[in-house]
Image (cartoon, rainbow, N blue to C red):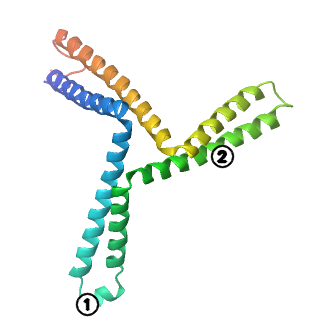
């Protein structure tokens, strides 16, 4: 009984891993289209939220409408959603630029730490090298945020592909091993 449940669970894991594998392939092969689809989806969701807020405003009583900001908020959220849907690279560029700025701060901190560490340790060179690398990546992200996000999506896709393949192989091996077992040692009889 328990053995069959574990086998079914592993088969579901294989199916889930196959879906993740497909997602990884899509992200790795078409990162820009994936980013545009993602931001367009966010735009659509915001438009729907805004429309529901506007509809809810008109469902309120006259007294409730006096103090409600639902109409204005709904309109603004809908307009932001429409803007993101039409200009889907804007959100990606904004987020990537923020990540670039955060990395620049981290890189500069590492460089400062290396300079401060120079008199106390010979390991300062590694901190300096890592700081320069982080700062370089941050500058690239700030200068060209959409391409930076595209590269990032490709890396995520590759990681998903590798992870999915490992999970599929692992699940197949577990199912094969379970086929050889008559009963589990910890299963009650």
Image quadrant assignment for residue 83:
bottom left
Is 11 displayed left or right of 147 in the figure? left
Residue 144 point in image, percent of width and height: 53, 43
Residue 31 point in image, percent of width and height: 38, 36
Circle 1 or circle 2, nearest the eye: 2
Residue pointed to by mark 2: 105
Identify the mark nearer the N-term, 1 or 2. Answer: 1
Residue sitting at 67 percent across and 31 percent down? 130
Image quadrant assignment for residue 172:
top left
Residue 104 point in image, percent of width and height: 64, 44
Q: Nearer the viewer, residue 149 or 117?
A: 149
Task: Assign a secondary structure to mark 1.
Answer: helix
Residue pointed to by mark 1: 62
Task: Assign a secondary structure to mark 2.
Answer: helix
Residue sitting at 19 percent across and 11 percent down? 181
Q: Nearer the viewer, residue 188 or 21?
A: 21
Residue 149 point in image, percent of width and height: 46, 41
Residue sitting at 30 percent across and 52 percent down? 41
Q: Nearer the viewer, residue 17 or 178?
A: 17
CA gap between label 1 and label 2 equals 51 Å
């Amino acid at each position: 009984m328990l053995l069959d449940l574990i086998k079914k669970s592993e088969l579901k894991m294989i199916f889930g891993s196959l879906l993740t594998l497909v997602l990884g392939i899509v992200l790795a092969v078409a990162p820009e289209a994936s980013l545009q689809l993602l931001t367009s989806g966010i735009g659509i969701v915001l438009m729907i939220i805004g429309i529901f807020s506007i509809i809810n405003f008109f469902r309120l009583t006259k007294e409730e409408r006096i103090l409600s900001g639902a109409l204005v908020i709904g309109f603004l959220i809908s307009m932001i959603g429409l803007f993101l849907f039409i200009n889907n690279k804007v959100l990606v560029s904004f987020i990537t630029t923020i990540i670039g700025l955060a990395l620049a701060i981290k890189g500069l901190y590492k460089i400062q730490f290396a300079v401060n560490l120079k008199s106390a340790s010979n390991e300062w060179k590694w901190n300096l090298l890592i700081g320069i690398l982080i700062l370089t990546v941050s500058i690239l992200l700030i200068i060209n945020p959409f391409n930076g996000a595209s590269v990032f999506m490709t890396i995520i896709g590759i990681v998903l592909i590798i992870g999915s393949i490992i999970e599929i192989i692992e699940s197949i091996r577990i199912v094969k091993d379970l086929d050889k077992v008559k009963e589990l040692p910890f299963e009650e009889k």
